[in-house]
Image (cartoon, rainbow, N blue to C red):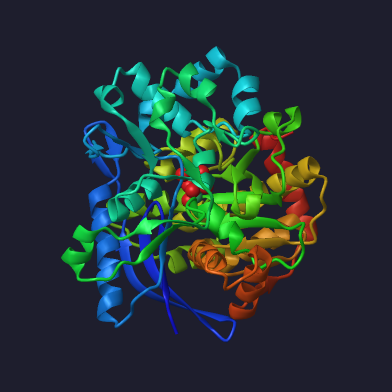
Amino acid sequence: MPSILAYDLGASSGRALLGRLNDRIIEVEEIHRFGNDPVAVGDRLQWDILRLFHDLKQGLLKAKHAGEEPVSLGIDSWAVDFGLIGRNGELLGNPYHYRDRRTDGVMERTMARLTPERIFGRSGIQFLPFNTIYQLAALKEADSPLLEQAKHLLMIPDLLRYFLTGEMRSEFSNATTTQLYNPLLGDWDAELIAAIGVSPALFGPVVRPGTRVGEIRDSLREELGVGAVPVYAVAEHDTGSAVAAVPALERDFAYLSCGTWSLMGTEVDRPVMGELARELNFTNEGGVNGTFRLLKNIMGLWILQESRRTWEKAGLTLGFPELVRLAEQAPAFGAFIDPDDPAFLHPGDMPARIARYCADTGQKAPGTPGGIVRCILESLALKYRYVLELTERLSNKRFGGLHMVGGGIQNALLCQWSANAIGKPVWAGPIEGSALGNLAVQWIAQGEFADIWEARKVIRDSFPVTVYEPRDGAAWDDAYGRFRALAGLA
Ligand code: LFR
């Protein structure tokens, strides 16, 4: 049975999975897992892109050692970040991390100059301070020599795919996250790009998910002793791949892709670009089969991950299961935060920031790791309810429940509290959302599945969905009222 290979790169780790179709059931095997630690040098935070490429090679080697010859491969990763390529075809500098502080204030200045109406009206993308448009504007403001030298811009998976194949192509789902792609034109928005002082010539041809973009280059085949594996552009934005893997049976479904970020919304056939979408700061990210993801970013488990790092630095090493257990034992509804407060965006001491947030909002700050984790998880669940209500309002849809996918669903307490907060069932699964969406798009391209709906059905048949029924409705309704008032959410 031929296997195919999916690389799924997250903001803290990456993995290579082999997928096989056995009698219409998907089997996956993780063959390589690796860290992806951003590296701070001076004031800058950057990705170790060459190490990531090294780990892609390790994935190919491990597949070979397992006796596998994958018939294709695809890469998905986080969005918005990019590398710049010089005239000799080489990468100029390390890609910056989207949480680097060099973009502080740039979005506000760019919005004031270009107006939010113009930026949103041309891109349909939510305003996030780290969008590619503001990262480029920051380089421009700082008179970066990189921009002077650059001939091509490639998003992270485009860049790794280029390293693998020698072919430069921009993939659609990830291109949309730049806020420089115009879904109405179906191409890069040269006017917006020029308006931030960058050359539109940096942006190359855009290909759809499912396009075969080359094969592993000769030098790499020799180096690794592997065959000419075809390389596909999948939905290279990890959220695009995760939503492709949502095992929904109904067309109008709500999802939450749950990892470092929580991405919540619904799938639509056309971008929703009216005034209400802009005011609510919703986004329209490109997906598979010409769909768009009408969604909002929620800060997600990042706040918990950073809290854990802070405690670890102080000599208190606690695993996630242990932290979740402590949270369960802590008193309910002690204090709330708005997870999307800008204070929580950059790396750092989250427990201290939570304490400050509580002081500023007249709440008694939780004093123990269990109390802090409880505050984070309850606040996330309440924010999910808020964003789900906005999604219903904006899309004119009513959802019977919420599909949760991604690594975050291993946190059963968060799934249960999410169901409690929204007052509807949560259907949790699959855990490997992005990698499965990545595999599914390769299989669609190869004719194994007719379309994304058949892929979703096979995913549903292959991986169990855990159902969480809502409980304690009155207590959560009351908490929701307090949360909204305190976070200033109308
Ligand atoms: C999730 C994700 C989000 C994007 C954020 C930054 O991994 O891709 O969709 O907003 O990372 O790139």
- Residue at 29 percent across and 50 percent down: it is 166
Viewer-closest of 303 and 433: 433
The residue sitting at the left extreme is 223
- Residue at 25 percent across and 79 percent down: it is 65
- Residue at 27 percent across and 74 percent down: it is 62
Q: Position of residue 186 (x, y in %)?
A: 60, 37
User: Looking at the picture, does residue 183 appear above or below residue 375?
Assistant: above
Viewer-closest of 226 and 244: 226
Q: How many marks?
A: 0
Q: Is residue 163 visible?
A: yes
Viewer-closest of 485 and 30: 30
Viewer-closest of 463 and 119: 119
Quarter that holds the N terminus: bottom left
**For residue 104, which quarter of the picture?**
top left
Quarter that holds the C terminus: top right
Q: Would residue 105 appear left or right of 348 to someone viewing this image? A: right
Q: Position of residue 132 (x, y in %)?
A: 45, 33
- Residue at 83 percent across and 45 percent down: it is 396
**For residue 417, which quarter of the picture?**
bottom right
Q: Position of residue 91 (x, y in %)?
A: 25, 39
Q: Position of residue 420 (x, y in %)?
A: 72, 61
Q: Would residue 438 appear left or right of 59 to someone viewing this image? A: right
Q: Would residue 64 appear left or right of 446 to someone viewing this image? A: left
Q: Is residue 6 visible?
A: no
Q: Would residue 477 appear left or right of 120 to someone viewing this image? A: right
